[in-house]
Image (cartoon, rainbow, N blue to C red):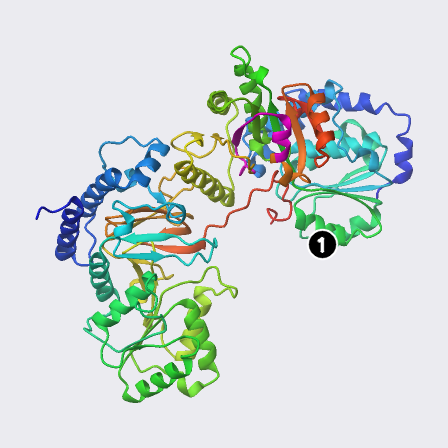
Amino acid sequence: MPNRAAARLMRGREMNKIFREIAAIWLDKNYRFRRASIELVSGSSGLSKEMVALGIDVTFKRIMNGDSFLPAYTKSLKGAVFAIIGGIIPAVTVEAVLACLSEKRPLILKPPSIEPHFGRIFVESVLHEYHELSAVLKCLPIASNDSLSIKNAVDTCDTIVVYGDDSTIEKVRLISTGKNFLPNGNMASFGFIDSEALSRERIDETATLAAYDVAMYDQQGCLSPHAYFVEADYKTASAFAKKLFEKLESLENRVPIGRIPADRQFLLRKFIEDWRLKSLMDKRIRMFQRKDSVTNSVILDPSPETYLSPNFRVVLVKPVVSVPEMLRSLLPFQKRIKGLSTTSSPARLENAIKSCDFLSPEIITGHGDLQYY
Amino acid sequence: MKKTSGEKLKELLLGYIERNGNKMDDSAFLEIASEIFSFQRKHNHVYKDYLKETGFRKRTIKKLSDIPPFPEAGFKITESAAFNPSSAERVFVTSGTTTGAGGRHFVRDLDIYRRSIDNSFGAFCMNGRKKMPMLSMIPPGELRRDSSLSFMTSHVIERFGAKGSGFYSSGSGIEELLDALRIGSRSNEPVMLLGTAIDFHNLCKAAEMNKEAAVLPENSLVFETGGFKGRKEAISKKALYEKIKEVFNVGEEQIIGEFGMTELLSQAYDVVSQFKRERYFLPASTLSVRVVNPLTLEDAAEGEEGLIVHYDICNIYTNAAILTGDAGVRVGGGFIVKGRAMYAEPRGCSLDAGSRDE
């Protein structure tokens, strides 16, 4: 049972200071909780240790820097919160914990069954450093199919935050009647690269940052772009696609790709072969990839349709003449867009989005900055 | 008249069959596969472009895995053939039950298909018999000219069927078929009952309603040709075989499973006498099967699930090497088909807490 009275005691505490202290210790490479989580999270999530470490660094650096990091639902939290975390991205857990603390809401956190370690370790570390928070912060490491325990936790809370696919969200919604229900479903992000960012002087850096956003968490997070819309002619877009492929390859040397689940392996192969066959019919389609694998693939596709990537560092590059052309391509995903990154000023994208009236991305940010959200 | 390169390859193939029958000769197989690859690389323009796209540059083929397989899906959206497809003797069409779109296999020379069937069916299914009465629920080739299975069935009956053989619709002709079985059971002459999984499913249902009719003469055989996927009513192979055994009072060894694809001219068979534990398919001597890692296309370890790749040296005029969308495992000298590869559809981020949890 979350202790609402204890939550009130948090009032007046300098939460931002606490967050920065937590971030500082997690950025210490020798911090035992960090070391343990890299080991265990890599094992359960399949992400490489280097990727887990990078994810931890990115997450806590942005907190240290005082950047905005709280999820969009933060201000909607009411009373005691039960957060059901999904997926394998550590940042999601951190966000949920800090959102509740910042709003002085007691929290029961259920880590994902697929990757149960980070949630448990992170909560343990926060409580280890701040014992007084033990009355308001609990980790409930139960299995996702333990319906009874989940229902019991839902019943004791006022707000239910759930991350998951549509069926998971629906299941939780059914047992959350009358609660403040805050679902976070599968989302996708995209990037826009303006013509100036493709100049001879800047294309290298543009591709480096794009590769970084694509590769983060092996593209399994909501914030990794599935496609880059490039404000350029076919030839320049092709040069960018090639450069992006090279950057993905070089990034892999430092941050290796992790384990790929069997269903995703099949999907990746199908996705690549389908595109290869398409390229036989449409010579404008070009594929940049290694001979011996299908990950780290960049597909140059000038068609107006946009496709979701199968993840694991596979991305489309699409030449467009304008921002509105990109937005039209994104229409099929209008309810699923988490973030848009841009090399131009975010205002340019924001204005175009306002006038198109059918997209409402949660985040619009600078190029290469998606992962800082 | 001077022989074309395709005809020379056919000669090579028939010589191989003549010499080896249904016994696989790995080095001779590789030699022919390599020759066919060179032919297809030169004359099949779709495959040639595909190889270019994959960055393939090898000059010599040292092992089968050196030959890049063409995706099964390519038969749906391209006209993959090493000859002018308009001069095909027959075009076999896939049902497209899984994806909704059918693929086309342009067959330049049906005689190759007949020779392939003669070679493997006799060895795997006839068990020393020359002929036996065959009752088929699969429509004859004359009625389904675009069906590779119907062509095969008609040819099998023409070549191996004894007096009393015939075709029965698994829908309207079921009562007639049950009558024929009843008559056959009185004469006690073994028969072979041929049908797809769904045919047998329907027949079992009908036969269960009339126990008397559901008797097969002793030593009869059940020849099941697959088709478990893409149906409204899911049927597992194991459950169907149990049902067939129960309804027709036949032993496991009397059921023969056949694996074929519209895109292939060679087949594989599972015949129970050849297994110790689980049933699995053994390919004909003209077919070599690999199970590969989907990411790298390198051989998966025995027992490890991967994608099935077929090398069919009877496919001289289209694609001998085919990367299927079937998941399978390699076992013994054969393979088990686990069904269509289960793809997790792209859905943005992988926050699929439910679907990927235990």
- Asked where in the image residue A162 lies, by quadrant, the reply is top right
* Closest to the observer, B186 or A158: B186
Residue under the point 45% across and 43% down: A270
Residue under the point 53% across and 25% down: A255
Compared across the picture, whether B316 is left or right of A178 comes to left
> Which segment is the magenta one?
A308-328
Q: Which amino acid does label 1 sit on?
A: Ser
Across and down, in percent, residue B191 comes to: 29, 78
Q: Which residue lies furthest to the left in this view?
A: B1
Q: Is residue A104 shown in magenta? A: no
Compared across the picture, whether A292 is left or right of A36 comes to left
Residue under the point 26% across and 83% down: B189
* Closest to the observer, B75 or A309: B75
- Asked where in the image residue A293 lies, by quadrant, the reply is top left
Query: Relative to B160, is B355 above or below?
Result: above
The secondary element bearing badge 1 is classed as helix
Residue A133 in view, yes or no: yes
* Closest to the observer, A70 or A21: A70
Across and down, in percent, residue B335 comes to: 35, 54
Q: How many labels does the image show?
A: 1
Across and down, in percent, residue B34 comes to: 21, 41
Residue highlighted by disc 1: A147
- Asked where in the image residue B143 lies, by quadrant, the reply is bottom left
Q: Residue furthest front?
A: B86
Q: Is residue A313 shown in magenta? A: yes
* Closest to the observer, B85 or A90: B85
